[in-house]
Image: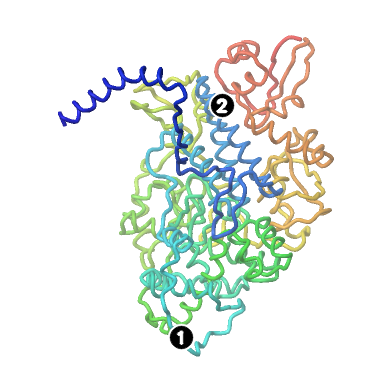
Amino acid sequence: MHNLLQKAAIALICCFFLSPGIAAQDTTATIDLKEMPLRLLDYQSPMQGVKGVDGLKEQPAMQELDNFQKDIMSRISDIYRIHINAMEAQVNNNPLQAEANINDALAATQGLLDDYPEISGDRRFTELYRSVIAEYRQFYGITETGNEPQGEIFAIQEELFSEDESWADTDFSFPEDLQLQKTQVPLIQNKHVNRHLVYYTLRRPEVMETWLTRAVKYQPMMRRIFREEKVPEELTYLAFIESGLNPSARSWAAAVGMWQFIRATGSVYGLEANWWIDERRDPEKATRAAARHLRDLYNIWGDWHLAMANYNISPRGLKRAINRAGGVEDYWAAYPYLPRETRGYVPGFIATTMIGMNPEEFGFQKEYQGEPYSYEVVEVEGLMELEDLAKAAGISTDELKEYNPELLRWATPPGGKYPLKIPVQKKQEFLANYEDIPKENRSQNITMHTVRSGESLGIIARKYGTTVAGLYGSNDNLSSTIYPGQKIVVPLPRGSASQISANQPTNQQRSVNTQRSSSSNTVSPPANSTSLSYKVKTGDTIGHIAEWYDVRAWNIRTWNGIGNTIRVGQTLSVYVPNSRKAHYEKVNEMSYAEKQEIERKQRRGENIFIAAATSTDGDNYTTYTVQQNDTLSEIAESFGIGLSELRRLNNINGNRIYVGQTLRITAN
């Protein structure tokens, strides 16, 4: 190394002294320049296109969007605006506004997923969902995992719908001369079905064995209900690929139960879901709702394969795939244009049905051991602690929850009697012990909470299933700053408005008529409401109309006795609050752009009703009439005045206001 350094130094010295002489003597000398080889980083411009999913052709990054995609993009951007408003409200130390925006963003996100279940795999949507959920968890101090999938079915779906299909190349000898039972749903066998047969018989036979064992418990009950609802019994196998027959299954997108109902669809079919109970988790009630839903979808499409696909995808998404396939209403024609999960839905059903009807032919046992689903019902009071009820029945609390999976909290829901399910032959023992439960062990509708270190109003509200607004309404002079040891009155949330049913969906005892409405199948209108008519126009969806009238899509379906399909020119009835009739009766005459602009303003947090509720009193003061869900801080912010000034003008000490109250805002 030393010698090398010496040689390098000598070379440098020689260059220093000799170079001038060379330059002076040879003025024509030239230097040959060699072009350096071009070396590029391993980089691909996003504008050059990326490889499409599922082997589709490359698409440009800025491809033109169709109306379906534009609607989704528009709604995602609106939700981000609400999300930003929520964060700004927290910066401004306004927990009431922050809570309203956080919950609006969450509701809008879930509403988008309800309308278009197929976007659960869309990258833009998943990023939005993570952001909204993160803010919700931060505000309410949620540290435990609350939105992780529950149930083995989701890991199975991930593997089945993955890009890696090397396992599907396995040689498999299918049973020859397989004698299938006669079915109403066509059991077509093709390469797509064979792929699922390979998966469940060779790749994951233990999964199918688990499901066949669970079927011993649940399928007799399910078949009975499907017969009663006049739906093909073989469709009970759809629950295999929905949840693996697991009543506690929960997807990250908040689809719940054995039949994976989202909250909106469950509500259409009468399944009660509140802070205390969720009937989507009850095997019997959910099966009844699923049978009715499938029958209604068949009435729309006239084809069981399309009906099943529509169970998994939005009507608009399915219609889009059909149109791309040339307009033929056939599942297999639309197959290449469906989302990957929906493409595997019908083949998965056919494969599990073939195995379930002929287990021995596919290498499984002919019969599996287990007891059919059964129970006894006892009526108990509301707000009874489950621990006390389990002791009265002589079973553990966990076992009591297994019999009553719809119960979400430590006690039965408040209100009337609750039909508690207990093991067969335990009824007499339970009734004898029930009378001995002390009266003081029964909860009240209001409780006191002592603030602990690190708690916020959001954390306390979420713990008891109430809202920050509810805490302000129950505590005079409550500040956004709380301290350890402080006592706060907490109102417990209400239970169901109806008496809970033991084995039927609580809120609806009939199917939704998907073909035409009649006076015999409509429901009672909401209190203090007015019926308005809306004529369906080109491009309208039930989701859009619901947004324009500030109701839920299931409200419109229920009021009109329809399913998810509407047609241009059809007249729909919509119920709106009497106090806002003047605003909503203009909607029918507005253009699509005008209606969407109002919706965007509302999503940005603007009060679109404030002008209609504003007037002038005899002393020339601008006044405002309090509307449903208004808060004092929101009204002050809407009119651009301070909260303390608004209190002074109206002689208000705390934050309590009531619907219909007239508030002075400022002198004109």
Type of the residue with mark 1: Pro
Extreme-front residue of the structure: 25
Please state the horizontal and vertical placement of residue 94, each as a whole percent of the image: 53, 22
Q: Nearer the viewer, residue 53 or 640?
A: 53
Q: Quadrant of residue 528?
A: top right
Depicted 90 relative to depicted 260: above or below: above
Which dot marks residue 97? 2
Residue that appears at 61% across and 23% down: 634
Say left or right for 220 vs 186: left
The picture places residue 198, in percent across and down from the top left corner, at 44, 74
- Kindly give the residue lying farthest to the left in the view shown: 2
Q: Quadrant of residue 635?
A: top right
In which quadrant will I find the C terminus?
top right
Upstream in the sequence, badge 1 or badge 2?
2
Residues under labels 1 and 2: Cα distance? 64 Å
Q: Residue at x 46, y 28 (%)?
A: 30
Residue 520 - label: none
Q: Quadrant of the N terminus?
A: top left
In the rendered picture of this protein, how many numbered marks are placed on residues?
A: 2
Locate residue 407, reporting x and y percent: 44, 52
Q: Tell me the SS state at disc 1.
A: loop
- The answer to whether the residue labelled 1 contacts the one labelled 2, judged by CB atoms less than 8 Å apart, is no
Going by the numbered disc 2, the residue's amino acid type is Gln
In the image, 420 versus 608, the foreground residue is: 608
Q: Nearer the viewer, residue 168 or 605?
A: 168
The x, y position of residue 611, in whole percent, is 75, 24
Label drawn at residue 175: 1
